């Protein structure tokens, strides 16, 4: 009942804006974080997504004949400084930010034609350097990339236009990873809102904020969604498990509390807006107690939803069931299942068949303001498709645009 009451409250918040401005006005048009910003091209929900053991997709492979509208390739410069084993790609305006380079990950910047610009951050211990590139965030409106090292209190900001750096020291060491909301505002999960390693919790809380908001100096500007509670996660817990999720999505985030059925978006106005309602049969939906105590054999008979992403017209969800992982695409308009892939590894992998080849590609990031998927692809797939490309050349970026409104 708690989650249904919480959903009702947030829906009221979403539709009762204090100043009565229209839904297509941006947050920059009206000052104040207590007003609601619901842009018509982003929010149309919430949409109900049903997941059970009998769902059947329309497609098991994406092609130009079904969900894909167009595909374009950006071959990355092949030079010693530009080489990367890219794991993910982000785009900031006309600049591609490509992350890879194990065992020490690094981010490289390329222009719109794939020409190498520079490494985004310098590795080291000086003020504007990071000791290791373990965590990074994007502030799209501010044109900044933010990086820090594991358990470090220093965040290094890089402006992609001026290629300048600035370091900000975090006075609250409990902020191990934050997410950007635009306008130099950030959000993070309170420590006690996450699984607690070990068998006991020393303090008991009746109510915790779901999210805490910060400004660029890490001063608290507000909280939202009181009612979250810490829970014990013994070391003996076997995966999968229910967890609290927060993911980047354009210039905002997607958020879901561990045992809730509702997924929210949060933007710079600091309002939680319901966007997805999960409909899972009770017999297949684990409780928090089952998530902690069930053995692996019992967990395999339940559906554990583990990953969410949104594009403008689609919902991407990854879940685990019967010992396998599933990656699906649903319509944001109707909730219909369009695509489903069964897999053993990856992050929201999709099967694509275009230009004479078939490949499984990970969807590591989507922007809910468009239908574009950016993913790295090995040059070996594109020999003969891109003139002059050789099999051992640097990777390329594959830009997939999905059809609108299916």
Image: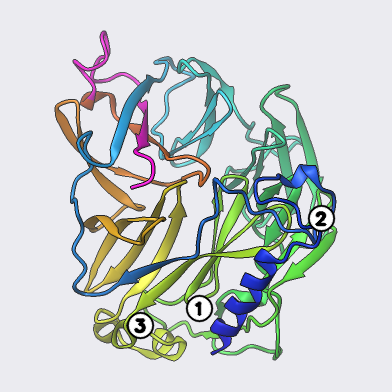
Q: Which mark sits nearer the N-terminus, 2 or 1? A: 2
Tally the numbered discs.
3
Asked if marks 3 and 2 touch (Cβ < 8 Å), the reply is: no
The x and y percentages for residue 375 are: 38, 36
Q: Is residue 119 left or right of residue 36?
A: left
Q: Nearer the viewer, residue 385 or 401?
A: 401
Can residue 127 be seen? no
Give the distance between the C-alpha atoms of the residues marked 2 and 1, in whole angstroms: 28 Å
Q: Secondary structure at mark 1?
A: loop
Against 64, residue 2 (above or below) is below
Mark identifier at residue 218: 2
Which range is magenta? 382-406
Mark identifier at residue 260: 1
The x and y percentages for residue 139 are: 67, 41
Q: Which mark sits nearer the N-terminus, 3 or 2? A: 2
Mark identifier at residue 285: 3
Asked if marks 2 and 1 touch (Cβ < 8 Å), the reply is: no
* Viewport quadrant of the N terminus: bottom right
Mark identifier at residue 183: none
The residue most toward the left is: 356
Give the distance between the C-alpha atoms of the residues marked 3 and 2, in whole angstroms: 38 Å
- At label 1, counting other C-alpha atoms closer than 10 Å, the crowd grade (few under 14, some 14-19, many 20 or more) is some
Give yes or no for residue 165 being in the magenta stretch: no
Instruction: Single out the mark in the foreground, 2 or 1.
Output: 1
Give the distance between the C-alpha atoms of the residues marked 3 and 1, in whole angstroms: 11 Å
């Amino acid at each position: 009942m708690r989650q249904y009451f919480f959903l009702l409250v947030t829906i009221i918040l979403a539709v009762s804006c204090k100043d009565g401005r229209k839904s297509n006005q941006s947050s920059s048009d009206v000052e104040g974080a207590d007003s609601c910003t619901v842009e018509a091209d982003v929010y149309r929900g919430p949409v109900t997504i049903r997941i059970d053991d009998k769902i059947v997709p329309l497609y098991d492979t994406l092609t130009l004949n079904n969900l894909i509208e167009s595909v374009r390739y950006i071959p990355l410069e092949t030079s010693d400084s530009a080489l990367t084993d890219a794991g993910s790609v982000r785009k900031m305006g006309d600049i591609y930010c490509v992350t890879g380079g194990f065992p020490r990950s690094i981010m490289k910047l390329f222009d719109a034609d794939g020409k190498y610009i520079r490494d985004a951050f310098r590795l080291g211990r000086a003020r504007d350097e990071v000791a290791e590139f373990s965590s990074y965030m994007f502030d799209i409106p501010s044109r900044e990339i933010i990086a820090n090292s594991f358990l470090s209190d220093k965040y290094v900001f890089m402006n992609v236009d001026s290629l300048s750096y600035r370091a900000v020291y975090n006075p609250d060491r409990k902020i191990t990873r934050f997410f950007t909301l635009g306008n130099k505002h950030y959000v993070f999960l309170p420590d006690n809102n996450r699984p607690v390693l070990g068998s006991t919790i020393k303090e008991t809380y009746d109510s915790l904020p779901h999210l805490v908001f910060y400004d660029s100096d890490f001063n608290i500007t507000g909280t939202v969604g009181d009612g979250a509670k810490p829970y014990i996660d013994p070391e003996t817990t076997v995966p999968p498990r229910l967890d609290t999720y927060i993911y980047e999505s354009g210039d905002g985030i997607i958020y879901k509390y561990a045992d809730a059925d509702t997924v929210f978006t949060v933007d710079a106005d600091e309002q939680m807006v319901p966007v997805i309602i999960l409909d899972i049969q009770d017999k297949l939906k684990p409780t928090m107690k089952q998530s902690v105590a069930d053995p692996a054999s019992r967990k395999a008979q339940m559906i554990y939803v583990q990953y969410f992403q949104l594009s403008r017209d689609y919902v991407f969800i990854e879940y685990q069931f019967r010992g396998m992982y599933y990656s699906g695409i649903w319509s944001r308009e109707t909730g219909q299942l369009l695509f489903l892939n069964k897999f053993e590894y990856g992050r929201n992998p999709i099967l694509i068949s275009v230009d004479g080849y078939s490949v499984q590609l990970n969807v590591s990031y989507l922007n809910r303001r468009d239908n574009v998927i950016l993913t790295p692809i090995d040059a070996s797939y594109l020999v003969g498709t891109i003139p002059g490309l050789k099999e051992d050349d640097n990777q390329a970026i594959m830009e997939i645009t999905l059809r609108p409104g299916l």
